[in-house]
């Protein structure tokens, strides 16, 4: 297959070094809902790459080769994952987060995990200690 066609099918992956975790600050929602919120802000798509629902199911938001819109100043080399919830989260969500992070680590060796608040002292997002849930960052 000629290279131009191959590259149009598989766009180049960007360099990814961080996995940044968020919460929706809502007790409900999914990719469709958050996409509506973000489009209403005038964004071109949902800002997160993954959303983990209350039942622990993971949904795909923005495609990974695309830079997200979830952590100001740190979007270019990161993946954004949002857990639906405000102050509390389900064990199913944490189990899925561990699984998703492990898979991403296989794909992006050296990937580190962080909470949104680690990059913005004015935020409490995701309202839980990521290192406690995932083990060491
Ligand atoms: Zn956040």
Image: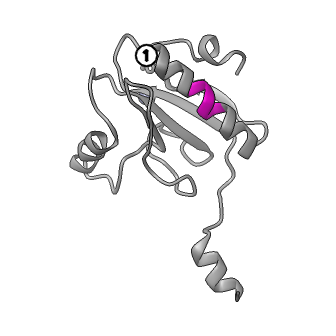
Side of 107 relative to 131 (left or right): right
Residue 64, relative to residue 129: is it above or below? below
Which residue is depicted at the point 35% across and 53% down?
45
Question: Which type of secondary structure does the marked residue at label 1 adopt?
Answer: loop
Residue drawn at x 36%, y 26% is 84
Q: Classify 4 as above or below 96.
A: below
Q: What residue is shown with label 1? A: 124
Q: How crowded is the residue under tag 1: few (<14 C-alpha within 10 Å), some, or many (20+)? A: some
Q: Is residue 9 magenta?
A: no
Q: Which residues are magenta?
A: 97-101
The dominant secondary structure in magenta is helix
Q: Residue furthest left?
A: 40
Residue at x 48% of width, y 19% of height: 92
**Location of residue 77 with respect to 28 vertically, above or below:** below
Q: Quadrant of the C terminus?
A: top right
Taking the image in four quarters, ligand 1 sits in the one at: top left
| Residue 26 left/right relative to 127 | left
Q: Residue at x 55, y 12 (%)?
A: 129
Name the outermost residue toward the right.
109
For residue 74, say whether it is visible.
no
Residue 12 in view (yes/no): yes
Judged left or right of residue 40, residue 88 is right
Question: Tag count in the figure?
Answer: 1
How far across and down, in percent of the image, does residue 61 sit? 42, 47
| Coordinates of residue 20 in the picture (x, y in percent) | 56, 32
């Amino acid at each position: 297959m000629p290279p131009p066609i191959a590259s149009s099918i598989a766009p180049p992956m960007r360099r990814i070094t961080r996995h940044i975790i968020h919460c929706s600050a809502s007790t409900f929602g999914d990719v469709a809902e958050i996409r509506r919120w973000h489009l209403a802000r005038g964004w071109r798509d949902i800002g997160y790459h993954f959303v983990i629902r209350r039942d622990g199911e993971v949904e795909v938001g923005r495609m990974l080769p695309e830079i997200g819109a979830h952590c100001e100043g740190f979007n270019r080399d990161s993946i954004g994952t949002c857990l639906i919830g405000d102050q509390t989260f389900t064990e199913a969500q944490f189990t899925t987060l561990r699984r998703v992070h492990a898979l991403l680590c296989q794909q992006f060796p050296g990937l580190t995990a962080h909470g949104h608040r680690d990059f913005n002292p004015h935020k409490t997002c995701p309202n839980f200690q990521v290192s406690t849930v995932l083990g060491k960052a």
